[in-house]
Amino acid sequence: MEEKRGKIQNKKMTINDVAEVLGVSVSTVSRAISGKGRIGEATRRRVLEFIEEHDYHPNGIAKSLAQSRTNNIAIIIPDVKGVVALPFFYLCMCGVNEVAQARGYDMFVVSTSGKDTSQLKRLIDNRKVDGMILGSTYKEDVFASFLKSKGIPFVAIGSLDDEEVVQIDHDNEGACRDLTSILLSRRWRRIAYMGNSKNLLVDEARYNGYIRAHRDVGVEIDKSLIFREEKTESAMRSHVDELLGKRVDCIICQDDAVCNIVLDELRAQGARIPVDMRVASCHNSKVLDNYPVSVTTLRFDNTEIGRVACATLLDMLEGKEVSRKTWLDYEVVLKESTK
């Protein structure tokens, strides 16, 4: 900590500097200075003593913080090119923007590619935003780690194995567990699982739900019916052809993008749904509405998750106490494809 103290001796101190040196969040420093919001007495005293030690007065800092507020937030989304993936982020952004505007904030959209954090760094270093919303989460999430290191308030849409990060998510594992349980209750014992490799935590949650549903009823899973690491569309199509020859009862698809490929390949092979093959998807979008047969899906309110994420972030910025983990509900929608 002494090294960090030395680095800021010769420059104008900011709230980010105070938070970084003390190893606390920006919102914690803000609450200590303003006297508003919940904060431990020991932490409050440590922040105020640090400020006094450096000849800065709490009221002056609070005033400068108020003047430097941008009333801008940013939502971070991956570089999405596929038409199937776009609806989720579009609806999510609509929810974020709706709440942001109602509470006097504007929204920036930051599109990321790979693990490049340079755009985020520019926004933070130039003090363009007050906080950020992480639109998706990965197993090894460089963006969450980067935002934590910068001390900027942020909320993650999705789950992370990090209790310090505020997270808003749908219960994807529970939803897929319920869907699989319903199919197993029909005495279908050869249920395949089709996915692809995107390293997203939501995909892991859905697969865990599929596994847990089988364990709940003591049904052993045939591992030859599971395909989760496919990186190309041609590989997935090949596996669909393989499953047609294995007399499986149903194919559960990881998401609507995978389901769209599965449906298209079944149609190309002349397979009738649900006569020759039943199909279900762990996520719904309007893309699946275009298929001639209505598809059994899990339905999530993607606009609502954006609203909740934005409201939670703005509450954080105002020094209010927020839940570390918020679960949103889902609906199992049974349609013609699993009759």
Image (cartoon, rainbow, N blue to C red):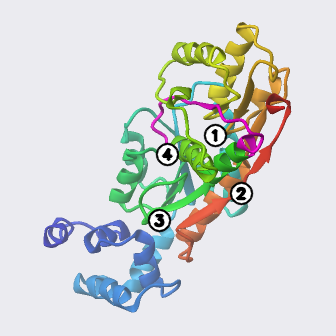
Find residue 294 and report its image quarter: top right
| Image coordinates for residue 76, horizontal then vertical, percent | 52, 45
Q: Are marks 2 and 1 in contact (CB under 8 Å)?
A: no
In the rendered image, the vertical position of residue 93 relative to residue 18, given as above or below = above
Bounds of the magenta span? 182-201
Residue to which mark 1 is pinned: 89
In the image, is residue 199 part of the stretch drawn in magenta?
yes
Q: Residue at x 82, y 20 (%)?
A: 275
Q: Residue at x 30, y 86 (%)?
A: 46
Residue type at the position of mark 3 = Ser
Q: Secondary structure at mark 1?
A: helix
Q: Secondary structure at mark 3?
A: helix
Asked whether 230 or 44 is in front, the reply is: 230
Residue 132 located left or right of residue 9: right
Rounded to the nearest angstrom, the CA distance separating label 1 from label 4 is: 16 Å
Q: Quadrant of the C terminus?
A: top right
In the image, is residue 82 part of the stretch drawn in magenta?
no
Rounded to the nearest angstrom, the CA distance separating label 1 from label 3 is: 30 Å
Residue to which mark 4 is pinned: 201
Find residue 279 and report its image quarter: top right
Rounded to the nearest angstrom, the CA distance separating label 2 from label 1 is: 18 Å
Q: Nearer the viewer, mark 2 or mark 3?
A: 2
Counting residues from the start of the chain, the first of labels 2 and 1 encountered is: 1
Counting residues from the start of the chain, the first of labels 4 and 3 encountered is: 3
Is residue 94 visible in the rendered image? The answer is no
Residue type at the position of mark 1 = Phe
Residue to which mark 2 is pinned: 329
Residue to which mark 3 is pinned: 68
